[in-house]
């Protein structure tokens, strides 16, 4: 049997591409290394699966590469896709979730659609080698091939080397949407405390990213949405070898002068902040010889580095995007070969943008592959 398309990787991008291609009458085989398809999908959005976002995609990714596919398959087209496989969604603060707020519901809908359109799936069958055009593991043959193997963020496999024989290279993977590790000195007493802050990632004196949201102090760094929002920029900064620190503003609603005036009028940091944060601000002010207001507005954690891949939601890096056409996701080096989702060097902000990319790129491949 020669398939029209072999999809290597049964994650969200691979399943979406396979459904779209099968619906066009193409004979599709999915090879999935894990014991079941879509395992990562189940872990997304704390089990609720944040599928997409109503905000414009502009500026939400590490490059402009996703622009073409997202222009062709924007939110409305993606919601049509989800409705078309029987999934009802809801919007919560701009984020799109399944109406049930159950990631399992999304996976069930995808699996049912795969069965309906006749795509074949083999689980516990990792692609170990791809030869010529296209023979996988010496056993499965197809006219075209999609690599949709995702990344090892949290869990998963790195399989980008499978495309090395076709001349494809990849950029280094570094955790993004991940906690930040920092020097421990100024974390003393803060473990487990959450605060609503503004935070800046500063490298060589320049602010490279800013975020305003919740930060969660840990014993070896910081987590929470504010830390996650800075982690993509940190990953890219690490690639250039830059040293970085995180400057936390515990009082973003006040200017430094306003804070100075408040403290001068007898308000104590303990009247504004968690008592352990107030104590940390007092220690920093004393150690650095600055005012309490300054220490509260510029609480600096040095030695910032990316957290471990096991705690990341996505990895920055992946197959070099310049080697793929942005509208079809077809290889420029080997026509008939495609890549989608996180296998490519595309990472997006928190809020559904990564699944949105996986879906848009999957739709682009599935709707256009095997046309020649
Ligand atoms: C904890 C967590 C929470 C997240 N929450 C969200 C969220 O709410 N919203 C959002 O937009 N994004 C979220 N993400 C990111 C999102 O899950 C990924 O960006 C997305 O799943 C990528 O889809 P993909 O199809 O590229 O890869 P995956 O979904 O990772 O699928 C890749 C598949 O390929 C398989 N595979 C790998 N190598 C081989 C091989 N050699 N042969 C065969 N199969 C192989 C893997 O087993 C896997 O099943 C989250 C990620 C994590 C880890």
Image (tube, grey):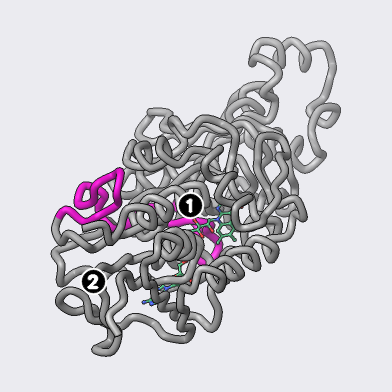
Is 257 left or right of 271, judged from the image as shown?
left
Please say if 49 is above or below 203: below
Is 333 left or right of 250, judged from the image as shown?
left
The picture places residue 62, in percent across and down from the top left corner, at 38, 41
- Quadrant position of the N terminus in the picture: bottom left
**Residue furthest bottom in the image:** 139
**What's the mark number on residue 359?**
1
The picture places residue 264, in percent across and down from the top left corner, at 77, 12
The picture places residue 208, in percent across and down from the top left corner, at 41, 32
Counting labels gives 2
Q: Secondary structure at mark 2?
A: strand
Res 342 → quadrant = bottom left
**What's the mark number on residue 143?**
2
Which is more N-terminal, label 1 or label 2?
2
Disc 2 Cβ-to-ligand 1 distance below 8 Å: no
Q: Which residue is pictured at 28% across the width and 89% down the height?
A: 139
Magenta residues span 305-332
Q: Per the image, is 316 magenta?
A: yes
């Amino acid at each position: 049997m020669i398939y029209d398309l072999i999809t290597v990787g049964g994650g969200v991008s691979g399943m979406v591409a396979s459904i779209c291609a099968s619906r066009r009458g193409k004979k599709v085989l999915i090879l999935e290394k894990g014991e079941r398809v879509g395992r990562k999908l189940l872990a997304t959005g704390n089990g609720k699966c944040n599928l997409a976002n109503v905000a414009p995609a502009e500026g939400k990714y590490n490059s402009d590469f996703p622009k073409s596919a997202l222009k062709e398959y924007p939110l409305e087209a993606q919601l049509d896709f989800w409705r078309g496989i029987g999934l009802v969604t809801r919007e919560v603060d701009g984020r799109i979730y399944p109406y049930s707020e159950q990631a399992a519901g999304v996976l069930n809908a995808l699996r049912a659609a795969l069965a309906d359109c006749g795509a074949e799936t083999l689980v516990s069958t990792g692609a170990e080698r791809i030869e010529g055009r296209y023979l996988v593991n010496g056993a499965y043959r197809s006219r075209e091939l999609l690599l949709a193997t995702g990344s090892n963020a949290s869990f998963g496999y790195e399989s980008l080397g499978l495309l090395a024989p076709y001349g494809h290279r990849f950029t280094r993977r570094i955790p993004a949407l991940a906690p930040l590790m920092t020097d421990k000195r100024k974390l003393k007493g803060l473990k487990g405390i959450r605060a609503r802050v503004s935070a800046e990632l500063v490298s060589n004196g320049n602010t490279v990213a800013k975020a305003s949201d919740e930060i969660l102090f840990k014993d070896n760094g910081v987590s929470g949405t504010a830390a996650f929002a800075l982690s993509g920029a940190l990953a890219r900064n690490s690639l250039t070898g830059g040293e970085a620190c995180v400057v936390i503003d515990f009082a973003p609603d006040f200017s430094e002068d306003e804070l100075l005036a408040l403290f001068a009028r007898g308000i104590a940091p303990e009247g504004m902040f968690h008592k352990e944060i107030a104590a940390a601000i007092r220690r920093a002010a004393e150690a650095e010889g600055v005012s309490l207001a300054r220490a509260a507005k510029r609480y600096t954690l040095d030695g910032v580095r990316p957290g471990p891949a096991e705690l990341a939601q996505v990895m920055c890096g992946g197959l070099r995007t310049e080697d793929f056409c942005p509208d079809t996701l077809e290889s420029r080096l080997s026509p008939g070969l495609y890549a989608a989702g996180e296998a490519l060097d595309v990472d997006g902000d928190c809020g559904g943008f990564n699944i949105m990319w996986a879906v848009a790129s999957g739709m682009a491949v599935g709707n256009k592959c095997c046309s020649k």
